[in-house]
Amino acid sequence: MDKIKRFLPHVLALFCSVIFLDSLRYKFTNHPNTQEIFGRLNDWAATLGADGLFAQTGLFSQYVIGVGELVASALLLLGFFPALRRLQGFGALKGLGIMTGAISFHLFTPLGIDPNNDGGGLFMAACAVWLSCLIIAVIRRDEIIAGLCGMGRALIGREKKA
């Protein structure tokens, strides 16, 4: 069990990073599939009075999401180094957030689970990455908590003992 706990996060981190990094060639080159997906989302947002939210300069543009995926990948991969292990947990949390958004938009907007007519492959990949990030976050929970406590101490400071 210890071997699984030691190696599984790395295998899952590599899997998630490959998926995230592969998607960047579509997002950063303005691929027609990306235009279709973010165009549909922007049209849906416009019906709610939030036109431009998913446009190329919008808050949730393909470029913003792509940068988030790039950062998540970097954190996941940096976690391979023992001194940077806690970054893997934070990368998993970032990936979990990104994929929660992706899955939600596939399920609860007109985008649907098969926007590219690929049999739902994009949606299934998002679900697999979401689950993988969740598993990494659970396994790395102690490192995540330690990192958050360290950030809290750095921001708030400690009381000095007399």
Image: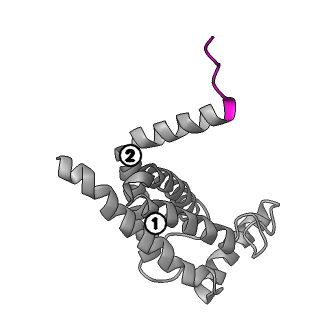
Looking at the rendered structure, which numbered label has been put on residue 47? none
> Looking at the picture, does residue 127 appear above or below residue 116?
above
SS class, disc 1: helix
Tell me which residue sits at (38%, 61%) in the image.
80
Tell me which residue sits at (56%, 69%) in the image.
70
Provide the residue designation for mark 1: 126
Looking at the rendered structure, which numbered label has been put on residue 140? 2
Marks 1 and 2, the one that precedes in the sequence: 1
How many discs mark residues in the rendered view? 2
Seen from the viewer's position, the closer of residues 32 and 21 is: 21
Question: Which stretch is magenta?
Answer: 155-162
> Looking at the picture, does residue 26 appear above or below residue 152?
below
Residue 161 falls within the magenta-colored stretch: yes
Is 151 left or right of 21, judged from the image as shown? Answer: right
SS class, disc 2: loop
Residue 39, image x, y percentages: 69, 77
Tell me, yes or no, if residue 114 can be seen here.
Answer: no
Q: Amino acid at mark 1?
A: Ala
Residue 50, located in which quarter of the rendered image? bottom right
Q: Answer few, some or many: residues within 10 Å of disc 1's Cα (few below 14, many 20 plus, some between 14 and 19).
A: many
